[in-house]
Image (tube, grey):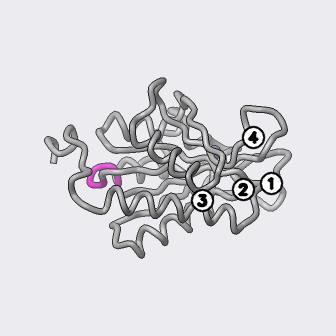
Amino acid sequence: MIVTVPHGLCKENYNKKNHLCDLVAKSSGEYIYEGLKKGGIDVVLLIPEVTREAIDMNREISRNTKFRMEVNEAMKDKLILWDIHSYPAMKDPPFTNDVYILDNLKNPKNYSVDLCKRFKDEGFKCEIYVGKNNDITNLAREKGLISLLLEICEDLEKEEREKICSVFVDWVLKKYSGSSHIPSKRRKNL
Ligand SMILES: [Zn+2]
């Protein structure tokens, strides 16, 4: 598996107001990565050394950067990619939930629906959005990987954010630690 955090690098002057990076995405990505590793998953964590201000690593324009090349390389032999982000809570919709799943389809994949339901069962407010411009997950799906983008609310307490991450890790481990999960398109290419 691959865990990517394309907006994970923050500078000292970055805050909720200017939102020049995803403030809690790196810590969440690391938490998820550690959980998956502990669960016996062969997983890599990829975070760029460049800020979003310099270049948005989740858009087509960044495809030739070192980070995106590393992601591409990892996609050659990994079957699943989780793209981790965070956002500041806003009073009005669309950003009033605890967690969002960005799927790149109008009719989201079954696994996105299943994961959102799982978050709700655990008491979190979750919604699925269409995320057409998310180049990393778009490319991952084009290459036949299972993939979705997770947005975690920055205004939750640390414990709540960690709970979201561990609900996610548990869901992944239950659903994907066997071998039957390998997408058929991908299996043909292996
Ligand atoms: Zn982001």
Which label lies toward us, 2 or 3?
A: 3
Q: Amino acid at mark 1?
A: Tyr
- Relative placement, left or right, of 66 versus 39 is right
Magenta span: 74-78
Check disc 2: other Cα within 10 Å, few if <14, some if 14-19, many if 20+: many
Is 36 located above or below residue 65 in the figure? below
Q: Main secondary structure of the magenta part?
A: loop
Residue drawn 81% across the image and 40% down it: 90
- Disc 2 and disc 3: Cα gap in Å? 16 Å
Q: Answer with mark 2 or mark 1, whichever residue precedes in sequence.
A: 1
Which label sits on residue 96? Answer: 4
105 in magenta = no
Q: Amino acid at mark 4?
A: Thr
Residue drawn 50% across the image and 58% down it: 168
Q: Are marks 4 and 1 in contact (CB under 8 Å)?
A: no
To which residue does mark 1 refer? 14
Q: Answer with mark 4 or mark 1, whichever residue precedes in sequence.
A: 1
